[in-house]
Image (cartoon, rainbow, N blue to C red):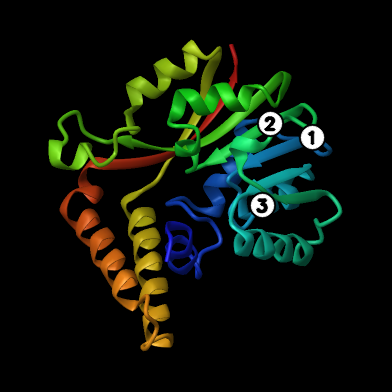
Amino acid sequence: MDYFDLISISTRNRAIMNPTTPEKVVMAGEMACLTAGEEVIEFGCGYAAVLALWGERFGIAGRGIDIREDACERAEESLRNAGLAGEIEISCADLLDETPDRLYDLAACVGSSHIWGGFSAALAAMAAWLAPAGRIVIGERYWAKESVPPSFSREWPEVLTEYEIFSAAREAGFEVRGAFRASPEDWDAYESSNWGGLLQWLEEHPDDPGTDEVREYLHRIQDEYAGYGREYMGFALYVLVPA
C-alpha cells in the first residue's frame, strides 16, 4: 500500500483535504477578488472542493490537476453534482510533467507545495501559469512557535515560519493580501476525520493484508498530532497579489 492509498483512505470522509473550512475558502476567494468568468488553475486539487466552492460563489472557470485517479473521479463527480462540469475540467496527471496550457487569472495550491519541494519552489512553478496580473491562493503549513523540538522539525524540513513565508512571497514578486488561519477546532476536525477514515477502512477490511500498515499509519499521525502537531504546527490560506 503506497502513500497515496493511505491518503485516499484517511480523507474518504472529507471534501477539503486540509485543516480549513468552506467559509475560509470563500473568504480567500473574496480577498483575491475572484469574478465571474475568470480562469483558475488548482494544483493538487484533490476532490475539487475548493474549485467547486469558487465556481458556485464566484462563477469561475478553469482546471484542476491531481495525480490520484480516485481523487480525480470523485472531483469530476463533485463538479457534475454542482453543475460545474462544463466550466471546470479535471486532469489526472503528475504536476511535474505538466506545462502551462494557457495563462490563468489565479493559481491555487492548498496543502501541496511539497510536490515542488516547498513554498518558494511552488511559487516559482505556479507563476509560470499566471497572466501578468495573476494572483495566488496557497494553503501552507507553518511553524506556530519559534522553538520547535528538533525531533519534530526534522520530520518537516520544508515547513517555514510565517516570517519566512511572507519574505519568500515578496522575493517571488508578490504581496501578501490576506491570511486565513486554521483554528484549533479546524485542526481537530481535520485530524479526527482522518483517523475516522482509517478506522472505518479497518472495520470494513479486517482480513486485508494492508491492515497492519493502515493501523501503523493511524497511530503515527495520532502520536505526531498529540505529541507536537497541535502545539507547533499552523496552517493558513495565503492570498498573494502581484507586487
Residue sitting at 84 percent across and 38 percent down?
Answer: 37
Q: Report which residue position mark 2 lands on.
A: 106
* First of labels 3, 2 by sequence position: 3
The answer to whether residue 35 is left or right of residue 220 is right
**Residue 73: % across, % down:** 68, 64
The quarter of the picture where the C terminus appears is top right
Q: Residues within 10 Å of mark 2 (few under 14, many from 20)?
A: many
Which amino acid type is shown beneath numbered disc 3? Leu
Residue beneath the point at 60% across and 21% down? 241
Q: CA distance from mark 3 to mark 2?
A: 15 Å
**Rendered view: 63 above or below 195:** above
Q: Residue at x 69, y 53 (%)?
A: 52
Q: Amino acid at mark 2?
A: Leu
Label 3 sits on residue: 53
Q: Are marks 1 and 2 in contact (CB under 8 Å)?
A: yes
Residue 208 position within the rendered picture, expressed as x and y whole percent measured from the top left? 40, 83
Report the front residue among 21 and 229: 229
Spatial separation of the CA atoms under disc 1 and disc 3: 14 Å
Give the left or right position of residue 216, taking residue 53 as reference: left
Residue located beneath label 1 in the image: 38
Can you tell which of label 3 and label 2 is closer to the viewer?
Answer: 2
Q: Secondary structure at mark 1?
A: loop
| Labelled disc at residue 19 | none
Identify whether 160 is placed above or below 166: below
Quadrant of res 118: top left
